[in-house]
Image: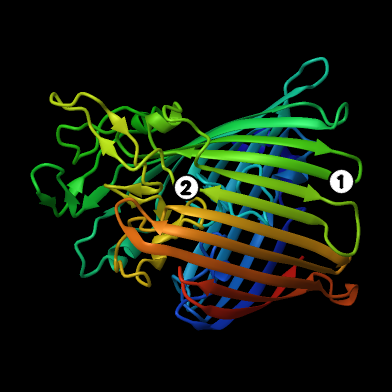
Amino acid sequence: MLASGIGRSQTERLWHDVGYGGSITATMGSGDNAPFWLTNNRQGLGNVDQGSIMVRAYVERDAKADSLRHWKVGYGLDLAAGCGLQSHFTLQQAYIDAGWKMLRLSVGQKERWSELKHRELTTGGLTLGHNARPLPQVRVEVPDFWTVPTPRGLFALKGHVAYGWYTDNVWQRHHNAGTDNIYTSGSWHHSKSLFIRIGNEKRFPLVLTAGLEMACQFGGEGYNLRSYTGGTTYPKVDIGGSMLDAFIPGLGGDVNDDQFTNAVGNHIGSYHLRLDWKARTWSIGAYWEHMYEDESGMFLQYGLWKDMLLGLEVNLPRNPFVSTIVYEHNGTMDQQGPIYHDATPENPLQISTMDAYYDNHVYGSWQHGGFVMGNPTILSPLYNGYLGYQGSLQMNHNRTSMHHVGLKGNPTADLSWRFLFTHEKNLGSYHRPVKDPLYGRFYLLEATYRLPRKVRGLSLTAAYARNGGTLLGRSNGGMLSMAYRY
């Protein structure tokens, strides 16, 4: 039993170091859709429509409260309700964390953030970002870097293995009502990662981090799937696939592959590198992420230098103006080339290009509840209705070239602000090219004021956001939020 394993004193401590709070947030604006940065990278709680009110309440205990103990226990419950949202009521988080030394078992639905990137200023990871709502899962992890016992402590590891399930069955059916677009129900999720850190900043300020993330959507039921050769449409079919198929990419085959066998499930992954120089009062870090969709990309058959996310993060010495600067460039124009050709007896040359990032012929795309599960600058299916693809889950605008700047400052102990600007050039996709390039310019200016100690825990946030260009059209919007945290 948990109580006997942890001990009575630790069980009693489960009710200590508990935080709770709530918030009320209102957004409003003008234009066809809400400004990009009021919608995206909000763990799926944003909305593309203008105007919403959300009330949120939570209780949580961070397992780090037991950092001095071998057993570590955390939990959380987070509820959201409102109007103008994807759902009037949302169970956003509900989880229990139980750890022993460096290992942790996490069960439930928990918000997680992109690896090796600044939480507030990044556009997000390419494979596992923080744009969509969290999935319920069972996850075994080393959540923080664990230093391998060596004389100088130069190596540290972290990683995870998880299995979970998708909760957007009702949303997918509603989104596709009246259309013959593909969608799925009851599908499963698998992800894993491994990161290694080389260096010890206490001995020398240069640190290198490298890692690999892999994820897969598998199983469930597919609707309106199409045969490649027979022209047949399947109203409903069991997709199949096992946990082993998901764990080892390349096993099995999809239900509508016909003679050209494909790996079962929707697989995606990323390589990561980050190099940091950590001085006493400032630091600078450069990072690189390369996403792949199939074995040719995973094994770098066509190189890795054309499509990637490049980033630079600078943390400045303490000053009242700017504390952190982030610059990112994400390019997905190449996708290993514009042609795909399966090997046949007449032409035995296999050309595995045209990767169609985030797209999938069974599951529609790498999404949950309409939000891309990776980087939102590849537009989520929620935008398809505005872009002329009603009901589609496909990725119609995945060829992008994006430049992004994020700034953050703390003028006083009670006042903080951040600014985001993103410029994007978009060519649609190889399957659905646009006649002329589309451009998007997305702005956000946000400030948070923490009220004096007499009303401890209360804060006010105000934001102004704007869209410009031809990609999503023009719109303006504002957000006001009042939050309390104890």
Q: Position of residue 39 (x, y in %)?
A: 53, 68
Q: How is the image coloured?
A: rainbow
Residue at figure coordinates x 74%, y 41% from the top left = 285
Image-based side of 195 in relation to 413, left or right: left
- Quadrant of res 116: top right
- Give the quadrant of the N terminus: top right
**Quadrant location of residue 465?**
bottom right
Residue at the spot x=50%, y=33% of the render?
Answer: 304
Q: Specify whether residue 162 is in view.
A: no
Front-most of residues 438 and 28: 438
Tell me the residue that label 1 is attached to. 282
**Residue density around tag 2, few if under 14, some if 14–19, many if 20 or more, within 10 Å:** many
Residue 338 placed where, x, y %? 34, 43
Q: CA distance from mark 2 to mark 1?
A: 32 Å
Provide the residue designation for mark 2: 332
Q: Which callout, 2 or 1, points at the residue further toward the start of the chain?
A: 1
> Residue at the location (28% across, 46% down)?
220
Front tag of 2 and 1: 2
Q: Quadrant of the C terminus?
A: bottom right
Q: Which mark is residue 199?
A: none
Q: Secondary structure at mark 2?
A: loop
Amino acid on which the number 2 mark rests in the picture: Thr
As shown in the figure, which amino acid type bears the numbered disc 1?
Trp
Picture residue at 89% right of the left edge, 65% below the top: 413
Q: Residue furthest front?
A: 436
Q: Image height check: is 265 above or below 156?
A: below
Q: Measuring from the top left, give residue 98's x and y in whole percent.
A: 63, 39
Is residue 114 among what the camera can see? yes
